[in-house]
């Protein structure tokens, strides 16, 4: 897509409080500081041996990143503890002060592992041209919205979510950062038919982590012994990752874990503690309409 096809609409900016620092691109809300580097993001030059981990926020991205890193390091835990996860794998559309995910990615030696939350239509075209392998992880919408709400409460770089009732409506309207959950999961689901994409589900990882790790290993063309796989299972459990400073984001000064920890609950079905009955009914109706024409289905309780 040429630069001139990227539409930036002024309407949304005007309707948002200025401190929220947002803009939208083709209907997808992103942080305003990303607008300044959008050309660099769009023109990012992927390499054929890049691996991309893509997801909607709160789908289990960090979990997948740590699994991938441990597989790449043949289960060597010390090697994976060389740096926080966000320094090991660059986050493409991220910028803080003069640091950007693009600069970080460009400085990384190959083979690189990169992260994005971009919806499929906004992914830099070079990933398709270079036929890069992509792992996409998806999580059911109900647990995603709850996790996202608590994340926006604790992360000072993201907009204040307001009350839960307000946020619930904002999410349903797709007016959250990185856009509509529906468009995201469906867009990537369709793309996997024409591109090497391993499409994972958070709920499958909760159910049978070893099976899902094996899938990732095979996708990466690796062959690890059973005991190495068991070690990776152990080191990517919720409890171990919650204690691990390289995966729990306690090294990120913009996150206030006393409001809500990044590694919060790590379960399927927590939405039941947050949704009212009326919200559940409303959500189900909205969901049915928006998911009517896809073969994609999610599990909301185990
Ligand atoms: P909760 O807020 O529901 O606890 P992301 O990395 O995409 O931001 O996703 C964060 C969510 O994944 C959080 O969900 C977090 O607890 C959960 N998570 C991270 N590591 C996990 C693990 N090893 N097992 C289960 N859930 C994990």
Image (tube, grey):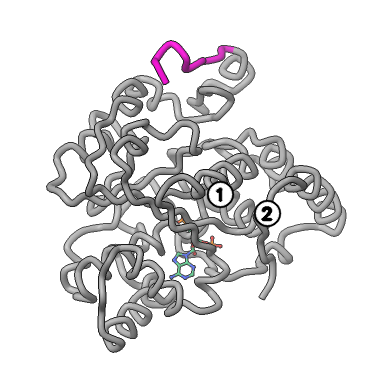
Q: Is residue 223 above or below residue 43?
A: below
Q: Residue at x 19, y 75 (%)?
A: 76
Under tag 1, what secondary structure?
helix
| Of the pair 22 and 225, the residue shown nearer to us | 225
Residue found at the very far bottom of the displayed protein = 227
Q: Which residues are magenta?
A: 1-10
Q: Is residue 212 above or below residue 149?
A: below
Q: Residues within 10 Å of mark 1 (few under 14, many from 20)?
A: some
Q: Is residue 234 above or below residue 119?
A: below
Q: Residue at x 46, y 38 (%)?
A: 118
Is 87 placed left or right of 300 in the picture? left
User: Where residue 167 sits: x, y (%)?
Assistant: 68, 42
Q: Given contact means CB atoms under 8 Å apart, are the residues at marks 2 and 1 in contact? A: yes
Q: Quadrant of the C terminus?
A: bottom right
Cα separation between marks 2 and 1: 9 Å
Q: Name the quadrant containing residue 36.
A: top left
For disc 1, the marked residue is 189
Q: Name the quadrant containing residue 143.
A: bottom right
Residue 5 highlighted magenta (yes or no): yes
Residue 69 highlighted magenta (yes or no): no
For disc 2, the marked residue is 295
């Amino acid at each position: 897509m040429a630069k001139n096809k990227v539409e930036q609409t002024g309407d949304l900016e005007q309707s948002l409080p200025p401190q929220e620092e947002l803009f939208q691109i083709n209907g997808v809300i992103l942080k305003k500081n990303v607008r300044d580097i959008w050309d660099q993001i769009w023109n990012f030059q992927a390499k054929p041996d890049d691996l991309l981990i893509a997801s909607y926020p709160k789908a289990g991205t960090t979990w997948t990143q740590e699994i991938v890193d441990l597989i790449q390091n043949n289960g060597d835990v010390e090697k994976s503890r060389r740096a926080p996860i966000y320094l090991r794998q660059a986050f493409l559309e991220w910028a803080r002060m003069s640091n950007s995910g693009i600069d970080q990615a460009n400085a990384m030696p190959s083979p690189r592992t990169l992260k994005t939350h971009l919806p499929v239509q906004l992914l830099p075209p070079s990933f398709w041209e270079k036929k890069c392998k992509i792992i996409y992880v998806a999580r059911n919408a109900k647990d995603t919205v709850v996790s996202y709400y608590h994340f926006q409460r604790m992360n000072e770089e993201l907009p204040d979510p307001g009350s839960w009732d307000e946020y619930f409506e904002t999410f349903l309207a797709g007016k959250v950062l990185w856009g509509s959950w529906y468009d995201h999961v469906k867009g990537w689901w369709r793309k996997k038919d024409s591109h090497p994409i391993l499409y994972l589900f958070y709920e499958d990882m909760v159910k049978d982590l070893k099976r899902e790790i094996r899938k990732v290993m095979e996708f990466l063309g690796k062959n690890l012994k059973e005991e190495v796989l068991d070690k990776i299972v152990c080191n990517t459990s919720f409890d171990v990752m919650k204690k691990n400073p390289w995966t729990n984001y306690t090294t990120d000064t913009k996150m206030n874990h006393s409001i809500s920890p990044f590694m919060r609950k790590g379960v399927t079905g927590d939405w039941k503690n947050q949704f009212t009955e009326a919200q559940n009914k409303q959500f189900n109706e909205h969901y049915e309409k928006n998911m009517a024409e896809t073969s994609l289905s999610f599990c909301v309780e185990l």
